Amino acid sequence: MQVAIGQPGFAMEQGIKVHYTISRSEIGRAAIRALMAAGLAVQPEENVSELTVEQVEHENKEWYSIQVTPQCITLKVAAPQALHLAAQTLAQSVGADSDGKSALPSMVVTDAPLLPYRGLMLDPCRHPQTVEETKKMLRIMARYKLNHLHWHLADDQGWRIEIKKYPRLTEVGSHRAETPTLANHEVGDGTPTQPFYFTQDEVRDVVSYAHSLGITVIPEIEVPGHSSAAIAAYPELGNHDVPGYAPQVATTWGVLPYTYAPKEVTMRFLNDVFAEVCALFPRAKFVHIGGDEAPRDQWQKSPFVRSFMQENGMRHAGQVQHWFTHRMAELLAGHGRRIVGWDEIIDDGAVPGDAVVMYWRSWVRPSSLLRALRSGHDVIQSPDSHFYFNFSQGKLPADPAYRPHGSLTAEQDWRHVYSYNPVPAGLTPEQKKHLIGLQANCWSESIADGRKLEYQTVPRICALAEVAWRPAELRRADEFLQRIRAQYPWFEQQKINYRREDGTPALP
Ligand code: ACM
């Protein structure tokens, strides 16, 4: 970025005047939509052309360049998705001219991200986020050029997406008898929750809003574990021949014993559920199947599963999960999608080569990141050592609502996030190509509302965005702090409850 400091800029008082010829081309229309989604005013006008847009060849589909002079803004992009990135750069560059009026500086920018997948995961299962809270997070993500929302829609503690063919998923699975208190996760609050789920209309609304901001939404339905809510709704899907079988929507956090049984009725169910899910997420090339923390106890105890294993020549119950992963990959390939799974999916044997591994278990040795790369899988990194935004950032307000959970290995403030190097030393060029993304996860056991979500996420999200964007050797934390500080007026204007430098929340 080269900025002509002290030179006149491009006046923004009346927005960007766009000649109607621009709106005749597809790329021109897409540019106008992206500028408006980024909050910039665009005025159609007969005799002025202040915007030109051109698509050029570049191997990085998110490459873009911007030239601003007092007369004109020139955008060049490798593909339409880069228009959103250019538009956000313009929106962030609006300042004041020497006369104090709103203006863009005269400048030249060429830019492209390090990693193509830059994501955030929201978990409406433990504590829900409303449609409006979800959209506010999407606006924050777009500002920092994150391009994927991973939406964790089904877990033990709640099923959060309407599925027309299986109404009990939401009738039974979308509420629970009580919730662990924030102050002490061992104690329940004794209060039944209201049913909460996204209707299919609401899902379409969120997906299309995200799309207008250049963000793709990746749905996640957990298979084969973290499935208590679905099994409570349809007990025949679980291992009902084990002693003491009594599935319910979970009222505690952690890893629960309920898993799907490897039966045809389960496969019919998953087939139907993912058919509706794929229709609701038409642009998601990836669909997340979960795959983490699936206990084997019920499979080991179930006479049905034991004979299933014998018939299929399986020697240990981990192979049942492996069977599920293959069936899900096959099923989703039928919809033209690739599966994404938490890194446990590679623990029990080879899985289809196009499966994307989401690396989260930073503590497992040998490293599942390296194992995934050596097996030729694309990897999205979200190690809990750096990118679990539910974890503490250090100094906290006294309010129990702000207390973190889990045993923390570090104070994961933005500096800690910023210290991550997403390209480990010693990889071959081929392995490096498989490092496709970086993501932070906002698990919501301790995040009961939108305010806390913002406190946990902002400004760490800025550090996430830059780690995914800029090669590690070009990053300097102290210089970055200056740029975080430049965001405070936007946080204030957007009424974001960001974490201040002294650890206090910005909103009372
Ligand atoms: C996870 O944190 N269980 C993916």
Image (cartoon, helix red, strand yellow):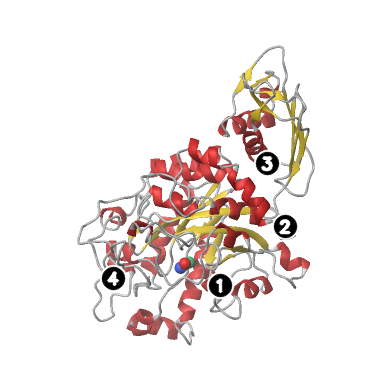
- Answer few, some or many: residues within 10 Å of disc 1's Cα (few below 14, many 20 plus, some between 14 and 19): some
- 3D distance between C-alphas at marks 3 and 2: 19 Å
| Amino acid type assigned to the residue bearing label 4 in the image | Glu
Marks 1 and 3, how far apart at CA: 32 Å
- Would residue 19 be visible to someone looking at this image? yes
Residue that badge 2 annotates: 471
Label 1: which residue? 362
Q: Give the answer, above or below, for where 413 lies relative to 89.
A: below
Sequence-wise, the earlier of marks 4 and 1 is 4
Mark 4 or 1: the one toward you:
4
Q: Looking at the picture, which amino acid does disc 1 mark? A: Ser
* Percent of width and height locating residue 15: 62, 22
Where in the figure is residue 243, as x and y percent of width and height?
25, 81
Secondary structure category for the residue under label 1: loop
Q: Residue at x 39, y 69 (%)?
A: 264
Asked which secondary structure carries label 3, the reply is helix
Residue appearing at x 43%, y 63% in the figure: 222
State the image coordinates of residue 78 (x, y, percent, origin top left). 74, 42
Q: Which residue is mark 3?
A: 82
Q: In the rendered structure, which disc, 1 or 3, sits on the residue that comes first in sequence?
A: 3
Q: Which residue is mark 4?
A: 186
**Total number of numbered discs in the rendering:** 4
Report, in whole angstroms, how far the alpha carbon at label 2 lies from the one at label 1.
Answer: 21 Å
Q: Position of residue 187 (x, y in %)?
A: 25, 68
Instruction: Give the quadrant of residue 405.
Output: bottom left
Q: Is residue 303 left or right of residue 32?
A: left
Q: Is residue 276 visible?
A: no
Classify 10 Å Cα crowding around label 2: few (below 14), some (14-19), many (20 and above): some
Q: Earlier in the sequence, mark 4 or mark 3?
A: 3
The answer to whether mark 4 and mark 3 are in CB contact below 8 A is no
The relative height of residue 413 versus residue 215 in the rendered view (above or below) is: below
